[in-house]
Amino acid sequence: MKTRFPSLLALAWLLAAALTTPFSATALTLPPGSLALTLSSNNLVFSFPTTTTNYYGLQMSPDLLPPWTNTLAGIQGYGLVKTVTLSNGIAAGQGFYRTVTQPKPTQLLLPQSTAFQILGYDCGGIQEQVYLIGFDPTNGYPTGNVELKTVCSCGKACSSPHTASATVTWDLAGNVISTSTPATGAPANPTFIATDGFNDILYNAGANAYLIVPVPAAPTGVTAAQSGDQFQVSWMPNGVNPVAITSSTLTATPVNSTASILTTTVTGPVTNGVIPTLQPATSYQITVVSTTVGGSSPASTPISVTTEAASVVPSAPTNVVASWSNPDPTGTNDTLVVTWSAAVPGDSPVDQYQITITGSDGAGTFTQTVGGTTLTTYFAVDFIPNWTVTVQAHNAAGWGPSSTPVRLGGL
């Protein structure tokens, strides 16, 4: 016998009533956002409309108070009514159920190269069955057992492929961080689901294993201090496990200025970074966005910082090298090539370099000016005399000192 419950956004299911009170099995029309339940044997069959291809989860609470417990996860919508079954759901007793949207799950696997190292064979391919055990009690990372099997037999009977097993720990971006053999711990549970204190979700779906990490909230506690022509920025992650953050994007947007918007992305779960090439005497609004495998947070609340007027000139460029290219003994227009390493910029970016060459025996002095990101230049001069080469860097505070002279003999 199947029993249909009324359609509710959060469905209260009372076990005693379900077993003793008859309900009409007539199909219901589900208004947007509704959740309907059918009792089928010992299983609970839930139906709800989906409007996009987002992913959904089913949660339960005994009393409508947090925390809600994840009972099903990774349910993909297709814009139609979705039906899912909670096996042996009657054992849960009374409770309230609701659906929530979730980020796209990340499948947890062993890279095939690692699987080959463990198994020792590939034989046309390696099949994996992954069963999560839970969150490691020491570091909080996902842990599970992986069963490996070759696709064919590598000369053995087809009924006897090569097999092996391993216990694997992943980080919260789905990267393998450790393996041990053979597999240990809990036996395979194809319906396993677990949630940690940051609402990271692990679940098994048949022989596959998945991780769901929430989208972070906007970072908090953003600070920025100028150091030379850079902002040293720090912040605090928010609404997510800090070690789940895969990158953070720092943006400095000039206010009432034609200066460029500056963006830096730092990788990993760090909480500080640098925004370079600041313009002097310019106000910037600074924001931070955190990203996990689940998605990117909103931008933090902007903070405003105004850079100081430029007062520190760049250092002298270093590693100046002069050489000849395509020398022509019969002519006078040979190519002198000069390269150098970037100067330390002072408290504003280097906007240009000046290169000066002076020839012996009255060959003359020549200069070139190039942009602040250019580190090579060329002169068309006769290679016969000796040449002395120097380089200077310029920023908003003025010209810095010249580099140590480099002398280049004629060929």
Image: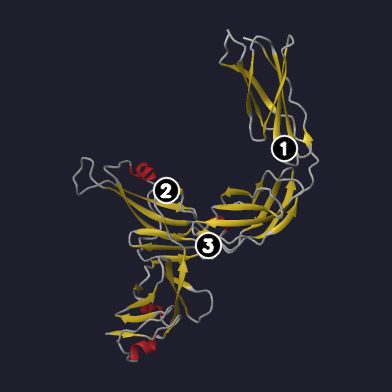
The crowding category of the residue bearing disc 1, from other C-alpha atoms within 10 Å (few below 14, some 14 to 19, many at least 20), is: many
Looking at the image, what colour scheme do you see?
secondary structure
**Count of numbered marks:** 3
Quadrant assignment, res 371? top right
Of mark 2 and mark 1, the one earlier in the sequence is 2
Q: Is residue 204 above or below residue 388?
A: below
Q: Is residue 163 above or below residue 197?
A: above
Going by the numbered disc 3, the residue's amino acid type is Val
Identify which residue, 200 or 153, lies in the foreground. 200
Residue at 73% x, 11% y is: 360
Residue position for label 3: 215
User: Please, what secondary structure does the residue beneath circle 2 have?
Assistant: strand
Residue position for label 2: 180
Identify which residue, 389 or 95, lies in the foreground. 389
Percent from the top left, x then y, of residue 245? 55, 55
Name the mark nearer the viewer: 2 or 1.
1
Is residue 18 found left or right of 246 in the rendered image? left
Percent from the top left, x then y, of residue 49? 39, 75
Is residue 48 found left or right of 395 in the rendered image? left
Residue at 60% x, 62% y is: 218
- Cα separation, mark 3 vs mark 1, equals 38 Å
Residue at 66% x, 27% y is: 340
Is residue 68 found left or right of 370 in the rendered image? left
Residue position for label 1: 345
User: Please, what secondary structure does the residue beneath circle 1 have?
Assistant: loop
The crowding category of the residue bearing disc 2, from other C-alpha atoms within 10 Å (few below 14, some 14 to 19, many at least 20), is: few
Quadrant (top left/top right/bottom left/bottom right) for the N terminus:
bottom left
Q: Is residue 19 above or below residue 358?
A: below
Going by the numbered disc 2, the residue's amino acid type is Ser
Identify which residue, 347 or 246, lies in the foreground. 347
Of mark 3 and mark 1, the one earlier in the sequence is 3
Label disc, if present, on residue 190 of the rendered structure: none
